[in-house]
Image (cartoon, coloured by chain):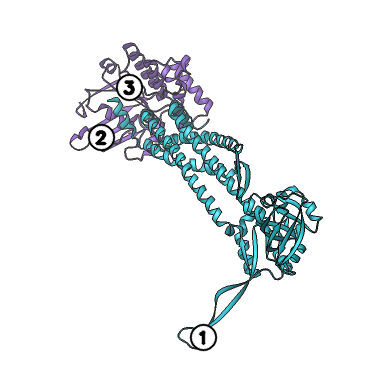
Amino acid sequence: MTSPNLRIAYRFLTAKKRAMVMSLSCTVLGVGLFIVTQATTSGFERFFTKTILGINGAIRIEDKIQDTMRSMAAAGGGDSHFARRDGVKYIEGIEEPQALMAAVREFANVRGVSAVVRGNVQLQSAFKAEDAQVFGIRLEDHVRVSDLAEQVTNGSLEDFRNSPTGALVGRVLADRLQLAVGDSLVISARGASRRVQVAAIYETGYREVDKTNVYLHQAEARSLLKRPGGATFLQISLHDPARAPQDAARLEQVLRHSVKAWQEREKTWLAVFRALRISTMITVSVFTLIASLAMFNTLAMIVLEKTKDIAILRSMGYERRDVTRIFLWQAGIVLAVGAIAGALLGAAVTWLVSQVPLPINGIFKTDRFIVTWDPAHYAGAVLTAVVMVMVASLIPARRAARLEPGDIVRGTAQ
Amino acid sequence: MSPPPPAPAAGPAWALRCRGLHRHLGEGEGRVHVLKGVSFEAERGQVYAIVGPSGCGKSTLLYLLGLLDRPDEGEIEINGRRMSNHDDAARTAARGEHIGFVFQFHFLMLEFTALENVMMPMRKLGRLPPAAMRERAHALLDSVGLGAKTHRLGTQLSGGEQQRVAIARALANQPAILLADEPTGNLDVRNSNLVFDLLTRLAKDNGQAVVLVTHNPEIAQRCDVTRPMRDGLFV
């Protein structure tokens, strides 16, 4: 320890053990709780995001935009005219999916693209009938834009790939129709019916999807839905899904189709998660505020008790800024120890929380509490503590520096 | 073992000089004119006693001379350099380099050992490497008879021992001026004599000007110069 100010700060602080332990505990708790709450709230949000990206991809291209132009005479007449875009009209579906897919693949952030044919159908098993939606896919394309490969719980994608009349049925739908892998069912649409066989059962955890979606090979779906060409939508996966809004805007501009990023598609749920995150941040900020108040209290007490020492230091040639630094060092020591211990506590509690059984099935499926391990949470917690504690410490530190040594000595000596 | 000899004194014979110092204390109706134009000089190697009744202004004068306080009027020169109008940083630097203080109530930093207390002014001045600081602090504590107690905390030392550590600390940076406010006021007769002898011997050995404020007539008589004060003026 080379700095005399740091040495003095350390001794001042350790001399007030009880107050120091209190400040330290508050800092540790503040940092730890910040990390735990961020890990848990963002854990669910990220899991939700992963689930919906695994089902619907990062971007969907649906309908073609048809521009309408209207020429109007400018008010006031004359020969001048201007063209105004006064609205957007959509032509349902994708007319030339292959050309559009080739164009989409030119975008650097695009990882995969899959053309999907969708239609409403009725399913009939040996026990029951249910309304559903058929998704006609090319398996090789679709596994690149979804997590279908990981979502299969019974049977295998290989069976689906090798069976032209195979179907992938959602877990909830399969349960309702009492279907198992290898069972057959009848799919009816637009007056036509086909018998298909359950090649595999999948589960996304998103109940609405698992209850209604049935995947068929695209040729089979086209035949069933009487749709020989085109596609209902293109599903796109991105290398960096966070950039989806920018890519969607660019795709829409270039391809003249309606393009929606996942952030827009799921904005309701994302808003809920954001509100939850903000609310927990506010709660945790209160803890950090308490930590800073505890530090303020400790330093204010030390300033009161150490006025004589401050006078001695000033009489020995220690400047006002040295006195300020001595008190800021004390806050710094508590912060350094508190940040490390708080981060360890946060990590330990986060791990414990991640072991808590918590079955959720609705917008995603999980058996345990979901947490995120993100260094940004640790950095954010430490940064928040540093700002709050240092701001709170500045007041007593500056007060100590303002003390006049002559006043102190005179007050004690006389 | 005695500390290393001081650097040869340069500049004027006097280490400390003040002219026409005025100082008021208090506010409003309670405002008191404590110093009423005091002038004083202290030469190197001389021991000065400022004596007088309580409230005559002797401690106030000492704090002004030590640059711990600012005069309302008048000039203070340390080693030929006028300091009364300088800013806080310059006055603080001058304190660290040229002035050593010994206070009545010892004012040791109790969380630190005797050795650390003595090293503290040296650490701030930063003139010596750490090993040399430690060596000098040991030598100073030896010279005040505390060579065996260098690693004791302030709380583990008696009043007389604490005051001896304070003297060693005051001498740490080899200041030109040693200011002592009632250095024996809180000690018994034996310790009073011990502390006074130490102060004067070390200061004389090192060619330092010593100015001490005291109520003790025996101590005052043993000084080279005694300056009685009354009502804010030397008489």
Please name the residue that numbered disc 2 is placed on. Answer: B21
In the depicted structure, whether residue A122 falls above or below residue B197: below
Looking at this view, name the residue that lies furthest to the right: A162
Chain letter, colour purple in render:
B
Q: Amino acid at mark 1?
A: Ser
Q: Position of residue A249 (x, y in %)?
A: 60, 64
Which residue is labeled 3 in the image?
B104
Horizontal placement of B47 versus A273: left or right? left
Secondary structure at numbered mark 3: loop
Q: Residue B1 at x, y = what percent?
A: 48, 16
Q: Secondary structure at mark 1?
A: loop
Rounded to the nearest whole Å, what is the CA distance between mark 3 and mark 2? 24 Å
Judging from the image, what is the letter of the chain drawn in cyan?
A: A
In this orientation, does residue B3 appear?
A: no
Mark 3 surroundings: few (<14), some (14-19) or many (≥20) residues within 10 A: many
Q: Considering the numbered disc 2 on the image, is that residue within a helix, a strand or a loop? A: strand
Percent of width and height locating residue A82:
53, 81
Which one is in front, B90 or A303?
A303
